Structures are given as structure tokens and as C-alpha cells.
Amino acid sequence: MFRVLPGHAERVKQAIDTLAECYAHIFANDMLITLDRNASFLEDARFMQAFNAAAADETEKSLLWRVHVLCWVAHNSLRVEGDFVECGVFRGMSTAVLAPYLDFARQPRSWYLYDTFTGIPADQLNPGHGNPDNYQAPGLYEAAVQRFAPYPNIRVVRGRVPEVLAEGAATVGLRGVEPDEWVVTVGQHLLHGQDATSARVRPVTWERVLELQGLQREDVLRGFLDKQQRLARSRGAVPPTNEEFLKAGP
């Protein structure tokens, strides 16, 4: 489908028909036209099966190329750790393609789908824009919940972004996180490879984070001084203690 100026739809159709006569392979949809380009994803049975099962109308069917790109990105993202997050879900069409394509129910991660399901908040709309009627259709949230019910690791969360992100963080173990606050995690890498599924979390001040960073630098310095002291003793010298050296300063 193409968005065109009023009165020009027929001219656009004629132009596309002319291109189709001149080239063996043409893709023309979703404001994209390609001529004799590689479109081997059309022969990917797993992708096409997932796409055809999810695309419910002509508008969704026109998104074929962009959803293929999304599948490619998501598939490569499986190489790194972390959950999936989608902000702005509507009916969940793209996720409905990706989930079976990635066999997401078997993936050791979660997928969070955030949306108001009542349209874009008025203060977040671009100037001069409004909500399409179907963005505010009744039952969008309930339909999304039902659509992804077969996936225990896909969670549909109703709320306004970014505020709902803090609420979502709280549901997975972070308490006291308020909208618009920054969250800094320290030491989360220590859980890697230990089959840990949870961790105790406590809030600290930013000054404490800076203090920890200072301790890390001091630890490195003390390690260096210890090595230098051992080397000096091996040569019969009497080196100053770490405390004496640190007190003396540069």
C-alpha cells in the first residue's frame, strides 16, 4: 500500500504496472519499490507461514519486507543475552510473526509488550497529528493478551511509556523505581554462568557508587604497591608501607 496525494492513486498504480512490465522482479508496497533485487525471504517457508498466519488485512500484508527485516534483526539478537521489549503494540502483528518464527516459547528470555491500548497519549502526539480510530478500538488489550497466551514468556503490559517501564521493572524485582529515574546496576555480571535466576537488590546513593569506583582504583594501586614491596624485599631493600606511600601522596 502507498500513501499518495488525493487524486493521484491511479497514476501511482499505472507507474507500478509499467515498472512490472519492464522488470522481471518487482516489490512495490509499504512505500518501498525494489527492481530486480534479491527477495529470497519470499521462499523462506518458515517466515512466510508465520507472516501469512499473522497478517489479517491488506495493510498488514503490505508490511512484508519490513517484517522480514525485523525477523532478521531479532534472530541475530538471540546471540546476546537480554529480554525483548516492544513499545507500541497495537494488535501485536509483528510480534505474532516473530514469536513463532523464533520459536520464542523455548527461548530462555522474556518479551514485554508495552502499550496504552487506547491510543497515543495526547501530549506525546506530534503537532497536527491525532490518533487513528482503530488505535482506540475497544478490546485491543484483551485481544493482545489472548493472542499471546500460548507464550508463557511473553507479557502484555498496559500503560503509558515511559512510566510503565518503571512499573514493569518493579514486577521483575526492582522496588522503589519511580518514573524518569535512572537505574544503575553494579555487579550484575557476577551472576553470569552461575545458573542464578534471582538476585537481592538494594538501592544506593550516587555518592556510594562514586565511592565504590574510588575503592576500585585504590585496590588497583594497593595491588601494584604490594608487588613493588615484594620486589624490593627480594633485593634486600626496606620499602615504605602502602599506608606511608599513600599518605605521602604524589
Image (tube, helix red, strand yellow):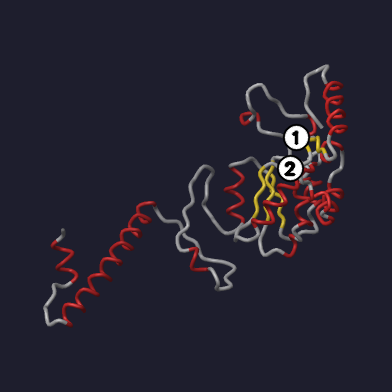
Dividing the picture into quarters, in which one does residue 128 lie? top right
State the residue position of label 2: 66
Q: Position of residue 193 (x, y in %)?
A: 55, 72
- Give the secondary structure at mark 1: strand
> Quadrant where the N terminus lies?
top right
* Vertical relation: 186 (above or below) 239: above
Dividing the picture into quarters, in which one does residue 17 lie? top right
Q: Where is residue 73 in the image (x, y as percent from the top left)?
A: 67, 51
Amino acid type at circle 2 is Arg
Nearest the viewer among 156 and 52 is: 52
Side of 235 where 161 appears, left or right: right
Nearest the viewer among 76 and 215 is: 76
Q: Could you tell me which residue is drawn at 71 percent across and 54 percent down?
A: 155
**Contact (Cβ within 8 Å) of mark 1 with mark 2:** yes
* Vertical relation: 24 (above or below) 229: above
Q: Could you tell me which residue is drawn at 71 percent across and 26 percent down?
A: 130
- Give the secondary structure at mark 2: helix
State the residue position of label 1: 32
Distance (Cα) linking label 1 and label 2: 10 Å
Side of 213 where 85 appears, left or right: right
> Quadrant where the C terminus lies?
bottom left
Q: Could you tell me which residue is drawn at 68 percent across and 24 percent down?
A: 129
Amino acid type at circle 1 is Leu
Nearest the viewer among 87 and 206 is: 87
Q: Could you tell me which residue is drawn at 57 percent across and 70 percent down?
A: 196
Nearest to the eye among marks 1 and 2: give it.
1
Instruction: Say which label, 1 or 2, has the lower sequence index.
Output: 1
* Vertical relation: 186 (above or below) 157: below
